[in-house]
Image: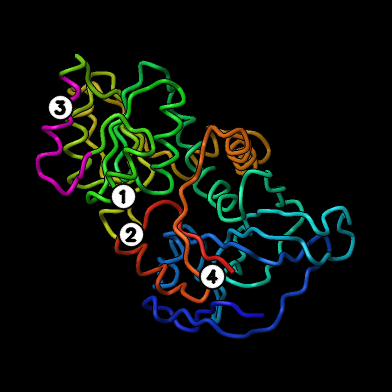
Amino acid sequence: MHAVRLHAFGPAENLVHERTEDPEPGPGQVRIAVEAAGVHLIDAAIRSGVRGPLPALPDLPTIPGREVAGTVESLGAGTDPSWRGKRVVAHLGLAPGGYAELAVVDAARLHEIPPNLDPAGAVAMIGTGRTALGILRFAEVTPRTVALVPAAAGGIGTLLVQYVKDAGGTVIGLAGGPAKTALVTANGADLALDYKDPAWPAAAREFLDARGTRATLLLDGVGGAVTAAALDLLGPGGLHLVFGWSDRGIGDEGGPRLLDESERARRGLTQQNVLGPAMMRKVGGDDPVRTLELAALDLAARGVLTPAVHRFPLAQAAAAHRALETRGTTGKVVLEV
């Protein structure tokens, strides 16, 4: 098979599209003929030599990627034969191997792809979709919600905008540049603003003042100056949910920079970092990750959420990483085979 392999940690150019051996499914596993593989900021961090949330960096050479969709073409011993030939999507877990024409995964991780989703869309929903729904577990979204969504043209941001609008809420979406703000408008946001324009906070405040309200919810994956300005738009009782801090660069292993307790009390705000263990505890159950994956695929199947996808050919994985690292993408980045 062809796959994208990493032989040395470093820049995106170290990702090499080459021939390698086919993986073989073990007991209880399937082999998928991959049609789409998800690309994540964590992939770029690991590629550069930062382990991120993983317990350790992978041994080299390695095939990056942990989200795949395609068709089951081979079964390991003891695997339910009904999986053969089905269109499926799966998260591979801690074991990489997604950037390839073939990938092996435990059958217990499989989901059938809903008929209205293509493989790239399915990959987006089990990755960014499950994260978006995990974030939203911390907020009660109603018609009275007035949400600020930085990075609203991204994979998670796109879905957050759709979810709030489906609930009848109001959304101010922020994105970098006119092309991205146009996408945010097309996605249903009530107001789309360019966060590169220093005047965006004044425009947002004018919008809120005209409606006699303040923002009630900040869904924040950016941090930095954008977040500082957005916090000033939150009214008393506002909720700031943090799920990323992309302004600090890929691979930063620190946490979000939240206001100190006295400043939060003065403003009347609640702030929470919702990633990792906090999200899993909130979801609960024996398998919170699968719970969120099922919920995300269900909302996509029912047309409530429609993922945005930025597509690259498998052989252009390096270009996909470069674009992701320089904020040159919109939606979920996916490699197509």
Q: How much space separates mark 4 and mark 2, taking CA atoms?
A: 19 Å
Marker disc for residue 64: 4
Of label 3 and label 4, which has the lower sequence position?
4
Of residues 219 and 51, the one nearer the viewer is 219
Image quarter where the N terminus lies is bottom right
Seen at 55% across and 65% down, the residue is 336
Query: Which residue is label 2 attached to?
Result: 252
Mark 2 residue type = Asp
Residue 205 - label: 3
x and y percentages locating residue 31 in the rendered image = 75, 66
On-image quarter of the C terminus: bottom right
Q: Which one is earlier in the sequence, the residue at label 2 or at label 3? A: 3
To which residue does mark 1 refer?
245
Tag nearer the camera, 4 or 2: 4
Q: CA distance from mark 2 to mark 3?
A: 32 Å
In terms of sequence position, does the residue under pointer 1 or pointer 2 come before the other? 1
Residues packed near mark 2 inside 10 Å, few (<14), some (14 to 19) or many (20 plus):
some
